[in-house]
Image (cartoon, helix red, strand yellow):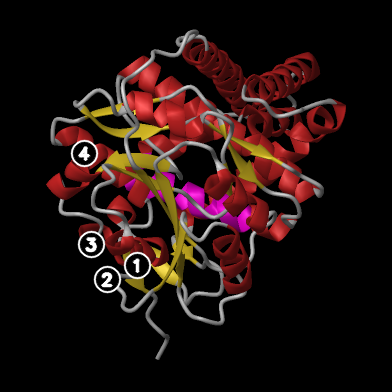
C-alpha cells in the first residue's frame, strides 16, 4: 500500500501531539524543581568563589553584567575577566569595572591557546589568576547577569563535600528586538528541557554557566583536556559526575541578558546548538529536540491536508507552555511574546535542521571550525 499525503499528515499530527505531551511533562518537571527548595538551609562560613569570565567583544548590557558580579555583598568572591587581546572592545569596560572594585576584579590577557575552543583557551589562562584559597570556580559567560542571592546559594550547595559541580536555571531577559525576544524565550525552553532530562532520566547535564569545586576540576585534569570541545560545559559536568562527584541543579534563576540580537544571530546560535545536540551523544538528543518543537510538524501536517483543529490546538498549547515556562523562570512574558511563539518555533526549526546536517561553526569573527562526535572541533580544510 502506497504511503499517501494523508498518511504523512497524520504521522506529523501524531508527532506534534506527542511533542506537546512531552512539553507538558517538561513544564511539570520545571515546576517541581522550582518548588523543591522553599526555605534556604543555613550553613556555617563562606566559601571563597572565583568568578571566571571570558570576554570577547561587547555583549548587550556587558558593563552592568560585570558590575552585578563585582558589587554583590557576598564577603568572599573575586571576578577575573579574561581578554584575548589588549585592544578587544570589551577592554575599556573591564577596566572601568576594575577601577570601581580594585580589591575584587582582575583582568588577565590570554597568552596561548590550548585548543580550538575560544572559551576554554581563556579559561585555561585566567584560572591561574584565581585565589588558590577559594575552593569554588564559577564559570560564567559574559552575557550572564546574576540574581540576588546567587553566591549564597552556591555557598550552600558546596557545603556538601560530595558536590563537585552546580548549575542554575537560566532565563533570557532584556529583549528589545524580535531576534532577542526569540532567543530569550528559547533559552527558557532549554532550561526546562535540562531539568526535565534530570527529573526523568537521572542524567546530569549542565549548560552555559556552572560552578565547579577546584578539586573536582583537578580530578578530570583541569580545563586543558577540553581545549577542542565546543560543549565544554556539558562535557565537564558529565565527566565530573563519572568521577563520583554529585552534580546538582540549584533553584535561583540567572539571566542570559540579550537586548538587540538580530535574526541572523538567532539562527547562528541555534544552528550551533542543533549541531551540538547532534554530536554530543549521537543523534538522539537532536531528534528529541525536533519532537519538542511541534509547531513546524503541525504546520507541515496542515500543508499536507491535516486537521485545522489539531494544528490550532498544538499551536495554542505550545504557545501557552512557552509563556508559562518563561514566567516561571522570571521572564516578564506577555502578549507580544505569546504572539511570536509560532514564528520563533519555525525559525528555530530551520536552525535546528541546518545544524543537524551542517556542522561548520563560526563564532564572533573566529575562523570557522567543524564539529565532530562529542562536539570535538577540527579546522575547516581550505578547498584546493
User: Where is residue 380 shown, x and y percent of the image?
Assistant: 39, 76
Contact between labelled residues 4 and 3, with CB atoms less than 8 Å apart: no
User: Where is residue 74 shown, x and y percent of the image?
Assistant: 47, 36
Contact between labelled residues 2 and 3, with CB atoms less than 8 Å apart: yes
How far apart are the alpha carbons under marks 1 and 4? 20 Å
- Comparing 283 with 268, the one in front is 268
Contact between labelled residues 4 and 1, with CB atoms less than 8 Å apart: no
User: Where is residue 132 shown, x and y percent of the image?
Assistant: 24, 53
The answer to whether residue 227 shows anywhere in this view is no
3 or 2: tag closer to the N-terminus = 2
Q: Which residue is the site of mark 4?
A: 240
Helix, strand or loop at disc 1? helix
3 or 4: tag closer to the N-terminus = 3
Q: In this view, does 227 lie to the left or right of 290?
A: left
Instruction: Name the mark on residue 114.
Output: 2
The residue shown at (61%, 23%) is 16
1 or 2: tag closer to the N-terminus = 2
Within-10-Å neighbours for mark 4: few <14, some 14–19, many 20+: many
Magenta stretch: helix, strand or loop mostly? helix
Q: In this view, does 28 lie to the left or right of 160?
A: right
How far apart are the alpha carbons under marks 2 and 4? 20 Å
- Comparing 253 with 94, the one in front is 94
How far apart are the alpha carbons under marks 3 and 2? 6 Å
Location of residue 174 with respect to 203 vertically, above or below: below
User: Where is residue 181 shown, x and y percent of the image?
Assistant: 75, 42
Q: Which residues make up the magenta segment?
A: 267-283
Q: Which residue is the site of mark 1?
A: 121
Instruction: Name the mark on residue 224.
Output: 3
The residue shown at (39%, 31%) is 154
- Comparing 270 with 109, the one in front is 109
1 or 3: tag closer to the N-terminus = 1
1 or 4: tag closer to the N-terminus = 1
Amino acid at each position: 500500500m502506497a504511503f499517501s499525503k494523508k498518511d504523512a499528515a497524520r504521522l506529523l499530527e501524531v508527532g506534534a501531539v506527542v511533542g506537546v505531551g512531552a512539553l507538558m511533562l517538561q513544564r511539570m518537571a520545571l515546576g517541581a524543581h522550582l518548588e523543591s527548595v522553599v526555605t534556604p538551609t543555613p550553613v556555617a562560613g563562606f566559601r571563597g568563589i572565583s568568578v571566571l569570565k571570558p570576554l570577547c567583544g561587547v555583549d548587550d548590557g556587558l558593563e552592568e553584567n560585570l558590575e552585578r558580579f563585582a558589587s554583590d555583598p557576598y564577603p568572599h568572591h573575586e571576578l577575573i575577566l579574561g581578554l584575548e587581546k589588549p585592544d578587544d572592545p570589551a577592554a575599556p569596560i573591564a577596566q572601568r569595572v576594575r577601577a570601581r572594585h580594585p580589591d575584587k576584579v582582575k583582568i588577565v590577557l590570554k597568552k596561548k591557546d590550548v585548543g580550538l575552543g575560544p572559551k576554554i583557551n581563556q579559561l585555561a589562562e585566567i584560572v591561574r589568576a584565581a585565589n588558590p584559597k577559594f575552593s569554588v570556580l564559577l564559570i560564567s559567560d559574559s552575557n550572564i547577569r546574576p540574581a540576588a542571592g546567587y553566591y549564597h546559594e552556591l555557598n550552600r550547595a558546596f557545603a556538601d563535600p560530595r558536590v563537585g559541580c552546580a548549575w542554575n536555571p537560566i532565563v533570557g531577559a532584556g529583549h528589545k528586538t524580535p531576534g532577542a525576544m526569540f532567543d530569550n524565550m528559547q533559552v527558557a525552553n532549554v532550561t526546562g528541557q535540562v531539568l526535565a532530562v534530570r527529573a526523568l532520566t537521572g542524567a546530569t547535564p549542565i549548560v552555559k554557566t556552572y560552578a565547579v569545586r577546584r578539586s573536582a576540576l583537578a580530578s578530570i585534569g583541569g580545563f586543558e583536556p577540553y581545549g577542542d570541545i565546543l560543549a565544554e560545559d556539558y562535557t565537564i559536568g558529565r565527566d565530573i559526575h563519572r568521577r563520583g562527584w554529585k552534580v546538582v541543579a540549584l533553584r535561583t534563576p540567572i539571566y542570559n541578558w540579550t537586548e538587540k540580537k538580530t535574526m541572523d544571530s538567532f539562527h547562528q546560535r541555534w544552528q550551533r546548538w542543533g549541531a551540538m545536540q547532534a554530536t554530543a551523544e549521537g543523534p538522539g538528543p537532536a531528534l528529541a529536540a525536533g519532537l519538542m518543537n511541534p509547531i513546524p510538524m503541525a504546520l507541515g501536517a496542515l500543508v499536507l491536508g491535516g486537521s485545522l483543529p489539531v494544528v490550532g490546538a498544538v499551536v495554542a498549547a505550545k504557545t501557552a507552555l512557552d509563556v508559562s515556562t518563561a514566567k516561571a523562570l522570571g521572564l516578564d512574558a506577555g502578549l507580544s511574546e505569546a504572539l511570536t511563539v509560532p514564528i520563533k518555533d519555525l525559525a528555530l526549526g530551520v536552525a535546528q535542521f541546518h545544524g543537524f546536517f551542517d556542522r561548520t561553526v563560526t563564532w564572533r569573527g573566529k575562523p570557522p571550525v567543524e564539529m565532530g562526535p562529542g562536539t570535538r572541533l577540527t579546522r575547516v580544510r581550505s578547498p584546493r
